[in-house]
Image (tube, rainbow, N blue to C red):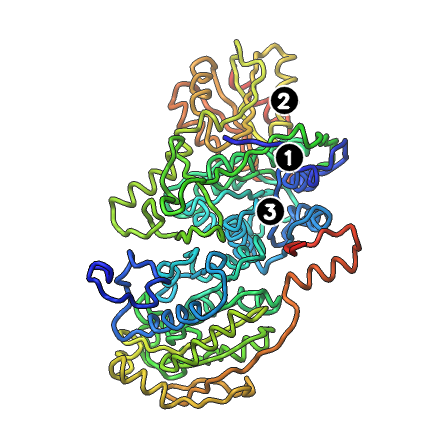
Amino acid sequence: MSAEARNEAKNPIENFLRMDRIPHIWCSGCGIGTVVSSFADALSRSELDLDKTVIVSGIGCTGRVAGYVKLDSFHSTHGRAIPYATGLKLGNPELKVVVFSGDGDLFGIGGNHFIHAARRNMDLTIICVNNFNYAMTGGQVAATTPTLANLSTAPYGNFEYPFSLPYLADACGASYVARWTVLHMRQVTTSIMEALNHKGLSLVEVITPCVTLYARRNRLGDGLNLLKFYYENSEVRHGADTRTLDIGFQAKITCGKFIDRQKPTFLECMNQHLSKTLGGKYIPYGVKP
Amino acid sequence: MKTRKADPKGVLAGAHYLDGDFAIAEGALAAGCRFFAGYPITPSTETAERFAERIPFVGGVFIQMEDEIASITALIGAVWAGQKALTVTSGPGFSLMMENIGLACMQEVPLVIANVQRGGPSTGLPTLTGQQDMMQVRWGSHGDYRIIALSPDSPQECFDLAIHAFNLSELYRVPVFIMTDECVGHMHEKVVIPPADQIEIVERKWYTGPKDKYLPYKPDADQVPFMIKAGDGYRFHTTGLTHDERGYPVINAECQDWCVRHLCDKIDKNADKIIKFEEDQTAGAEVLVISYGITSRVSVKAVQDARRQGIKVGTLRLVTVWPFPEKRVRELAAQVKAIIVPELNLGQVIKEVERTTAGRTKVIGVPHCGGWVHDPNDILQAIKEAVK
């Protein structure tokens, strides 16, 4: 029964969700829904025209976000949310384009697209839910899995080095980078708002418990335990050197806003360069007269 | 179907000396394509280069992506944003695009992909011709779906079919492929580009009803659903998952049946309107040569020689390879002693000829691994064998 039928006050984020698709598929204790709430909160407080705000997801647990958010929403293929979003942005530069996906999707299979979108400073807001594993397929090791964590395809513990996403994003040219754990709800909302208002490529990484797989295999307790653990073992260091942001197994998580710089986006570079080189014969693209 | 005249900004009217790759770029611009995303690969790169050179003066975007996967996916996004979009590639890049070609089919996104074929498999013959991706274009992505594939035999036809490809893609909300090859791609010939007011452009089938009634995947009478674009306030959803009329995922056999049959029906039921071919001297022919692309031009010499020797040879040149002109081939099969199918592969389209004719006539292939075109004598020999 809907809130309206029950004659109850609507949850304020219902306006941002496809309520005809709720309940969602996420496990109880999963942090993805909380990040979606922060995102909805950020949207409600932003001055964006929501008809011109679109969301793209890839595949995986977080890949389902686009299906629940009541914007023009695009569920693409595994790893390809960023090029899909690039097409939308360049196809109509008036759109505010948000990519909402998981660590495996954006930085495993889709890593090549992230590094090039960051290099180009493509005007995209990227929200990455990092739960340290491939959850939809049953808890396999990922590019973000902390060394020594145990997963179904690392049954004796992970012996690889994980990516530090802020360090990677910084090196590739992203112009806004922040990281929080999911219990930092207000900070997550603030960072998403800043990212939405930022011109250029922004990345907001949110560390989130995967209760059913990552937590269970590593005997880390239930969702609440892990939420608290991540929160209590975090330290906030705004502007920290991105070389110092590695995440060890059940170790300290450095949070904060690390990068916030202004530089021309892909389209600005294109228009500026071609106008300068070709003069009046160049027809600027996506620029309102 | 709504049509309008081409936007003169993209039309380089006049007579030109162009190669097939350049002609594809010009055809796309004439058709109103203002978005290109691609990755360099021989022998298709010239199309990208031409587009990059021309687009600043037409108004649009060229972006060289990080790979072919990104290129095809960016096209899908750009089309949802309202653009007409083109990419071009060859064998290895075509293989990389396959998954997202499936996404474009599933989300019913009109776009155009040119494959300037080279010899394969793998890296194969980067600089030399082939026609070995003809089955891949039909079946290459996983699952059941339909596409449209055209095969130009000259730079002029590269231009003409590029426009036609965009028109078909808009009519049927489907990816359309220009399956050319290295020979035609790099062949320089006269290309006449007509003035804009002589070029008919099919408009996207835009939805105009009330916003809350819009269903992105509800088939219209012609099987094709209406389209909208991102940013127009519909707050719609689209997915690569099996979906219902709303575009919402539904994971069961019943919806799968509805969804997949729809993707196939909209092409199958319109096949007669889509299919184009060229026939020559088929009335009374005892032998029929079926060919497409560069091979049809090589066949001309063999057919002329055979006719000089008194053999009644008719030709059927496939302009549309997929959907395959089953009806016409079946009719002709009832009349001829044999059908000869030369192609630059070890037997691809011939399989469709055999399936269609189902033993009604002899079907003789003239296979070739690619790297160069047939010796016309090989095709002539096959024709002579057929009437022996």
Label 1: which secondary element? loop
Q: Verify CB contact (< 8 Å) between mark 1 and mark 2.
A: no
Residue highlighted by disc 3: B88
Label 2: which secondary element? helix
The three-letter code of the residue at mark 3 reads Val
- The count of marks equals 3
| B195 relative to B250, above or below | above
Position in image of residue A221 (x %, y %):
25, 83
Among the two numbered marks 1 and 2 on one chain, the one whose residue lies closer to the N terminus: 1
Which numbered tag is attached to residue B6? 1
User: In 3D space, how far apart are the residues under numbered discs 3 and 2 (Cα atoms)?
Assistant: 32 Å
Mark 1 crowdedness (10 Å alpha carbons): few <14, some 14-19, many ≥20: many
Residue highlighted by disc 2: B302
The three-letter code of the residue at mark 2 reads Ala
Nearer-the-camera pick, B166 or A96: A96
Q: In front of the other: label 3 or label 1? A: 1
Write the residue at 38% across / 22% down: B359
Mark 2 crowdedness (10 Å alpha carbons): few <14, some 14-19, many ≥20: many
